[in-house]
Amino acid sequence: MGLLRALTITTGILASSVSFAQETVDVGVLKNSDLRVVQDILYPKDGALEIGGHVGWMPFDPLVTTPIASLSIDKHFNEELAFSAVIGGGYGMKTQKYRDLETPAYGSISPYVFRHLGHALFGAAWSPIYAKASAGGTRVVHFDFYLAARAGATLGQSIIPGGGFTVAPTVSPAIGMRFFMNKSSSSIRVELRDDLMMEYRELTSSWHFKQTPAVTVGYTAMLGRKKGGRR
């Protein structure tokens, strides 16, 4: 009799537990418009001033290769849109192909090209994606992906003597990623940009279109950032 009573009580408890679990799991249909409130962002950008230093290279010009350094300033209006500025400089050096052209075997040619000396670019950046990933199963890495559209000017100097300088109007689209650092307001930023410019050449009194991609890596700090949630 005691055993039967114990089985009856146990069955009742299990039935109640199943019923309770079913009630808590059934939350209905989640709409796309509700996704924004499901999780908070651990590293928010809304309202922050992001300042950073970057180093990089312009490696794809067959005649001139250029190390560069720059300062970036981004004012984030919200999590997606920001004013973006990049100001910096570098020094273009002859590539092996350029030096080969200067030898008698190639007719001692000195191509009329300009070395990169500096750039000032201003525009906007759009960050449509914020995500996280497991790094080696030991930690979670938070990152975002952004697109930038900037415009400004590039200062160049002729490599051949007497070729003058140029201040070239420049349009510079870019793509990049921020990797947020844990327990800090900083990030590692990687960017690929493509400088499209029109150079005026004094010796030929003509305009010349030039395309110069650049790869940069930098460290940025978020000033005045709001406190993030748990994610």
Image (cartoon, helix red, strand yellow):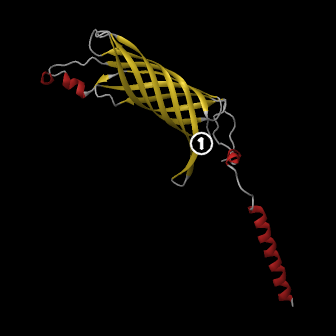
Looking at the image, which residue sits at the far left?
105
Horizontal side of residue 145 vs 47, given as left or right:
left
| Amino acid tagged 1 | Asn
Element assignment for label 1: loop
Image spot of residue 193 (x, y percent):
44, 30
Image quarter for residue 181? top right
Q: Is 128 or 10 nearer to us in this picture?
A: 128
Residue under the image location 41 percent in, 24 percent down: 196
Q: Is residue 148 left or right of residue 80?
A: left
- For residue 195, what is the image quadrant? top left
Query: 116 left or right of 3?
Result: left
| 102 or 81, nearer to the observer | 81
Q: Residues within 10 Å of mark 1 (few under 14, many from 20)?
A: some
Which residue shows up at 44% across the image and 29% down it?
55
Residue farthest bottom in this picture: 1
Q: Quadrant of the N terminus?
A: bottom right
Q: Residue at x 34, y 19 (%)?
A: 115
Say above or below: 143 vs 218.
Answer: below
| Residue 16 picture location, percent across and down | 81, 72
Measuring from the top left, give residue 101's x and y in whole percent. Answer: 19, 23
**189 up-or-down from 9: above or below:** above
Residue 146 location, quadrant: top right
- Classify 6 as above or below 56: below
Residue identifier under label 1: 182
> Number of marks in the image?
1
Q: Residue 180, percent across and down?
A: 57, 40
